[in-house]
Image (tube, helix red, strand yellow):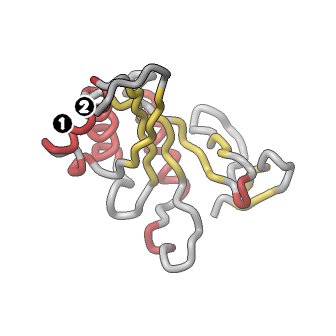
Amino acid sequence: IQRVSQPLYIGIHFEHPSEITGPTVRCVKELIAAGAILYSQTVFLKGINDDYFVLFELFTRLLEIGVRPYYIYRCDPVPGAMHFRADFDKERKIMTELRRTLSGLACPTYVIDAPNGSGKIPVPLEFWNCDTSEYVDFDGKRHNTE
């Protein structure tokens, strides 16, 4: 891999700590040695990573290998994949606990990717008392969280 002269940011999707294997770590180290700045994006997936301990391990290990956990997304309501959508309140509870226990660098921002490119909307965690049944996207449109 050639060294880059300008900052090169590369987003990598990781959903589970089992994806952080020897070959993965070697590739990450090569990219970093070439000057790339790596960040991760994760999607909450029911039965796969909708668990505090799984995500704690994932985000901790990513940071240890030089990948900054950047976003964790609510799973989009995609036909054929609805069985992967975790419970919204459960996701918020998990992210609240992760925010309490992880360093700021290891804890990604929890967002909903609004339809039609209308923004990545940060989800309020349980530190605030507010109605989370709907959100307003960057275009001012209202959407239900479920």
Mark 2: few/some/many CA within 10 Å (<14, 14-19, 20+): some
25 to the left or right of 131: left
Residue 121 figure quarter:
top right
Pointer 2: what residue?
A: 30
Residue nearer the viewer, 131 or 55? 55
Does 106 sit above or below residue 75? above
Residue 140 pos. (x, y %): 86, 49
- The amino acid beneath tag 1 is Arg
Q: Quadrant of the C terminus?
A: bottom right
Residue that numbered label 1 is attached to: 26
Mark carried by residue 94: none
Q: Residue at x 25, y 29 (%)?
A: 65
Q: Nearer the viewer, residue 104 or 118?
A: 118
Q: Report the residue at 66% width, 58% height from top.
A: 145
* Quadrant hosting residue 76: bottom right
Quadrant, the N terminus: top left
Taking 138 as reference, is 25 left or right?
left
Q: CA distance from mark 2 to mark 1?
A: 6 Å
Q: Position of residue 55 (x, y in %)?
A: 34, 43
Amino acid type at circle 2 is Glu
Q: Residue at x 23, y 39 (%)?
A: 27
Q: Is residue 129 above or below residue 88?
A: above
In contact (CB < 8 Å): disc 2 and disc 1: yes
| Image coords of residue 141 (percent x, y) | 84, 55
Q: Nearer the viewer, residue 52 or 130?
A: 52
* Secondary structure of the residue carrying numbered label 1: helix
**Outermost front residue:** 2
The reply, left or right, for residue 18 in relation to residue 73 is left
Name the residue nearer the viewer: 28 or 2. 2
Tell which residue pokes out farthest to the bottom in this image: 80
Label 1 crowd (10 A; few <14 / some 14-19 / many >=20) = few
